[in-house]
Each structure stands twice: as structure tokens, then as C-alpha cells.
Amino acid sequence: MLHNLTMMAIKQTEKREWAKLLYLKENLTQKEIAQKVDVTEKTLSKWVRTEKWEQMKASVIVTKSEELQRVYIQIRELNDFIFRRPEGERFANTKEADTLNKLTSAARDLESETSVADIIDVSIRILEWLRPIDFTKAKEVSNIFDTFIKDQLK
């Protein structure tokens, strides 16, 4: 029973993440989002209000690739800092080595993890690309993506 409750909570969390991405990145009504994510409009409205999605929508959203780029810049800058030392002293001290290790680990995690949020992000980007080319096909593909994403949430 506890396992089932935990799985339901995870699915609800993934649905909320999906709804949030749709809310932030797509020009859909709350009714349309609720239908796509398979929750009630009341539930969606509560999420929007309590988690302040409207304020988030107004702010700049950092994508996974932008975050990865920032981590790589930090690694490069720290390595450049170390390399500017005199010859024979171009090695990381304990604190720098720890920082490099953490940054490398963060980069590896960002490169390797694929979540439902990533699938949704790629789906949205494909649809944005396809919509001006073939609007009818974009609607068809959107329905396919919705079905696929719902399947991933099971």
C-alpha cells in the first residue's frame, strides 16, 4: 500500500512538472494544460497559484544546456586561474580540487540525466520548429507527444 501511495505521489509530481513546463513555455489555456496532463482545472489552478508559476513565467528560465554551459565556463576559468601560476605551482590546492571535482560531477549529471521534463522540453522545441512549416502536422505530432509523455508518467 505504501509503495502504491509513493508511486502515485511521484506520478503527481511528474504531472505537475509537465504542467509547469507547458504553462511556462506554451501558449495554452489552463483548461488545455489540465486536459493534456490529465488533472482537473482546479488542481492546475492551485499549482499555478501556490507555486507562483505566473511570476516564474515572467522571469528568465535557464535551460539545462545553459546550465551545463555555465558549469563548463566555471571549470575552464578555474583551470585557467591555476594555469596562470608559475611553472611548478600549476596544480590545484585542496579547495580547488574539491571544486573541480564537484563541477565535473555536476556536468556529468547534467549530460547524462534524461527526465520527463527533458522529453517535454525537446517536444516543445520540435513543435515550435514544425508549427510554421506545417501547422496541421504540428497538431498531429503534438497529440503523439502528449500520448508518449503520458505513457512515460505511468
Image: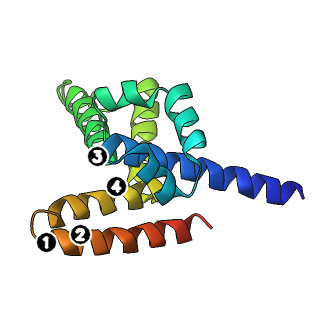
Distance, label 1 to label 4, CA atoms, is 20 Å
Please tell me whether mark 1 sits on a helix, a strand or a loop. loop
Is residue 153 visible in the rendered structure shown here? yes
Residue hosting label 1: 134
Q: Residues within 10 Å of mark 2 (few under 14, many from 20)?
A: some
Mark 2–mark 1 Cα distance, whole angstroms, equals 6 Å
Mark 1 Cα-neighbour bin, 10 Å: few <14, some 14–19, many ≥20: few
Q: CA distance from mark 4 to mark 3?
A: 14 Å
Q: Could you tell me which secondary element the residue under label 4 belongs to?
A: helix
Q: In percent of the image, x 34 and y 48: which residue is there?
A: 28
What's the mark number on residue 138? 2
How far apart, in angstroms, are the residues tagged by discs 3 and 2?
Answer: 14 Å
Cβ atoms under marks 2 and 1 closer than 8 Å: yes
Residue 59 is situated, as x and y percent measured from the top left of the image, at 30, 26
The Cα–Cα distance between marks 2 and 4, rounded to whole angstroms, is 15 Å
Left or right position of 96 against 130: right
Amino acid at circle 2? Ala
Residue beneath disc 3 = 27
Q: Position of residue 11 (x, y in %)?
A: 64, 56
| Residue at which label 4 appears | 121
